[in-house]
Image (spheres, coloured by chain):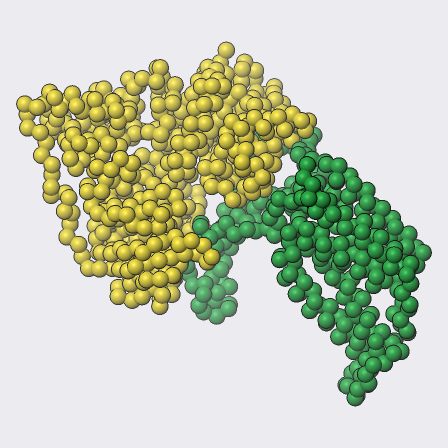
Chain colours: A green, B yellow
Amino acid sequence: MEDGNKKMLAYQFKDNLIYKLHPLTSMIFVGVVFVLALIFSHPAFLLGLLIPVGVVLGAAGNLMQGRNYIKFSLIMVLTIVLINVLFSRAGTTIIYRGSEIPLIGALEISLEAILYGLGMGLRLLVIISVFCFYTYTVNPDKALRLCGRLGGKSVLAITLSLRLFPLMIKDFQRISEIQRCRGVKLSTGSLWQRAKNTLPIISIILLSSLERSLQLAESMQARGYGSGPRSSYDRDLWRPRDYIIIALSIIALLLGIWSALKGWSAYRYYPILEEISGLDCVLASFIAIILLLPAILNWGGKKWPL
Amino acid sequence: MAAIKIQDLSYYYPETIKPALNRINLEIPEGQLLIIIGDSGSGKSTLLRVISGLIPAFYNGKLLGRVFLDGEDTVQMSRQEMVQKVGIVFQNPESQLVMNNVEQEIVFGLENLGLPNNLMKRRLMEMSTSLGLSEDLSQGVSQLSGGQKQKVALAGVMAMQPRILLLDEPTSQLDPVAAEEILNIIRRLNEDNGITVVMIEQRLERCCHLADRILLMENGLIAADINTGGRGRMWLQRAPLTYLPPLPNLFARAGFKELPLTVKQGRQMLNSLMADSSRASKPVPDTSIILGPAKGQELIDIQNLWFSYPDKEEVIKNVNLLIREGDFIALLGENGAGKTTLLKNINGLLKPSRGQIKLAGKDTRDLAIEEIAASVAYLSQDPNDYLFMPSVKEEILFTLRNFNIDNDSYAEEILKRFKLEAYRQCNPRDLSTGERQRVALASVLLGKTKVLLLDEPTRGLDYGLKQELGELLQEVNRQGTAVVMVTHDVDFAAEYAQDICLMFQGEIIERGNKYEVLQHSTYYTPQLGKLFNNIVDNVITMDRGVRVLSELAGFNEPEMASVL
């Protein structure tokens, strides 16, 4: 199968500091940004999250891959702004007043509504980009292994299905080809006909998968699965930078929670925009700088290699 | 003390009355390399599973008798002890790997034993270094080749440091190069580490030089226990003809008592025969066989075919090939030479990137796969990919209905032609490998099939089944269907095909009659070709080899006939 080995995963290892972080470190970083994005509503604070995530993504060498995400999210942001503008009547600074529209009523576009939409869009952007970062830089196997310490059997079940899934896709391709050569019509005929003709393929896959899972179970039995308490293999190394990044991420989280409790990271759009104070900006940039750390370390590592 | 001692062992699979193993007594000393041969259903795999403890733990059923490992009764051993004493590697590399990545797969068993992290690292390091897997540790399992997967499976088992290694046809799904590598590793484990090895293997030519002892099983019994005694070859005469590799088989059929194991030994025997018989006339090369039967009409005409998968390098480069009625062509070449891709271009699964393929004058680009399938049949490697109906007959009727032929008597005719009448009502998936392949073949061949394409048809077949398949294909060929098969099995190609096509890096390097192509090559030649090379011309098939050899030795024909 020369064409069968298409990469199934978005994760592709690249040789830089961010890829070499311990998976737990990356996951904590992602978690902190995600939680902060949910509790912050102040645009300065949200920007203070978006900028570091974007820079870190770039430092990891994934800006090109991130582009598709950005395209998609900009469309989402635009939609949010549009819907918010059309339906929201809470703003006071009206910048356009239009004619009557059915269902919605008189068209009133307020500055507050636009900015509120943009603010929500900003939050969405942060969340999408941090997920993009997770998808491209955290090895899914390793992430699963980390969860395995907590889960045990159910995680093994997930691992097994992850292992079998690509096999089944290959099976499906191969068996479809074979059955087409046997006269099974899969590309012509009505939808119902084609669906009916897929049945033989599905049943072959089911039969083969059943046989395969029996063999897998036998192989697991032969290697002592379930014969006693399992231990867990861990080869990911902890480096000083992992500790630093985890520590500072937690500081950022605490700082964020503290600002939220104090009400600094909240922002009022309606009925009229709240003033943005200097203190807010300073605090937001402080959090941003903390979260920029992985990128800074990566840059520093290249500049002054060990 | 014997590493394995089996006493009065009988075993019945659940809900059966016929024993799969019938009062077996066997002692295997430490460090022995034992090879088990036998037909499918003879109890080989069952015996391995009993030794490994999978029977009765995994299969239930009724087990009588006792098994001792290093003097200890297996009934008294815990599973943890058991898996650290015996490791087992199975036939299919795909269905014994559990984890997604090589490193995790190797440590899987160690985790099950609850070993500490540093010890696991140590074992991983040793296994990956000794099997040459260090570079692949972070690889995903799905990206590995079959041979690499089998190596990973072996590493995962050996990491648990068993003293006994059981292998159930470990190379049957691999190409010759990968098989050689696996067998080399097994030899090293046996010779350098003193591991006791019990291996089921069909193709003795690959491994009989490694064996200390060969066990033949029939119907759950040990039919022959042959000590190969210091790896000599005296044992060969005692082995049944059907299990002998081509070279000793040839000499046995020609009536020789002393049988060679290697080409070198065979040539020595042949040269001394030639010297003796110089007074007699040398065998005259038979030129009539070179010409072959007259060729019929053109069926498939491949003109300047180029093919590449999207965004990849070209796989097929400027291939021209004419397939006529009555052709029997074997496509030989290493992995990745483009053989399978060429087949898929012919049957329309892939469309040419440049150039064209004409099927009875029509460009295949303009034909749907189903239209091509009506005259071009395709049999892939794994018969399981075909079979899903509850009975053999329905399996055949299914194909016929796909082509709008709903004719019960015609289905019966096919059953008869492929000697499947007895299995008419059986579930095809319950049949043995060889029978399943016959069902799959019967279910792709229609009356109007002009060309039959086969991809690695001999994979996993023993000598007897290979012969059966070869004769069946020749029969199909004689009835007018052109046969084109991709194979790694040069001996099979030499024996049954007429023409050979050599493919290399996407090009057809040579096409010609098998005698022209195979006779004087060094790698792509059967064992018989290597034997007779530059001594007697044009001997690459068994029949002719036997004739020439007995002529040289001065045995007369009737005597030979009795051996055959």
Q: Is residue B116 above or below residue B149?
A: above
In the image shown, does B418 or B207 lie closer to the viewer?
Answer: B207
In the image shown, does A97 or B432 lie closer to the viewer?
Answer: A97
Kindly give the residue lying farthest to the top in the view shown.
Answer: B1
Q: Position of residue A166 (x, y in %)?
A: 55, 49
In the image shown, does B400 or A53 lie closer to the viewer?
Answer: A53
Task: Using the rendered view, name the quadrant where residue B101 is placed.
Answer: top right
Q: Is residue A254 visible?
A: yes
Q: Position of residue A46 (x, y in %)?
A: 81, 60
Q: Position of residue B150 (x, y in %)?
A: 48, 35
Q: Is residue B509 above or below residue B166?
A: below
Kindly give the residue lying farthest to the bottom in the view shown.
Answer: A99
The number of callouts visible is: 0
Give the residue drawn at x 35%, y 50%.
B506
Q: Is residue B308 left or right of residue A259?
A: left
Give the residue drawn at x 57%, y 49%.
A165
Give the residue drawn at x 44%, y 31%.
B182
Q: Is residue B286 left or right of residue B480?
A: left
Kindly give the residue lying farthest to the right in the view shown.
Answer: A262
Q: Is residue B153 visible?
A: no
Q: Is residue B135 left or right of residue B538?
A: right
Task: Using the rendered view, name the quadrant where residue B352 is placed.
Answer: bottom left
* Quarter placement of the C terminus of chain A: top right
Give the residue drawn at x 21%, y 38%.
B519
Q: Is residue B491 left or right of residue A303?
A: left
Q: Position of residue A12 (x, y in %)?
A: 60, 48
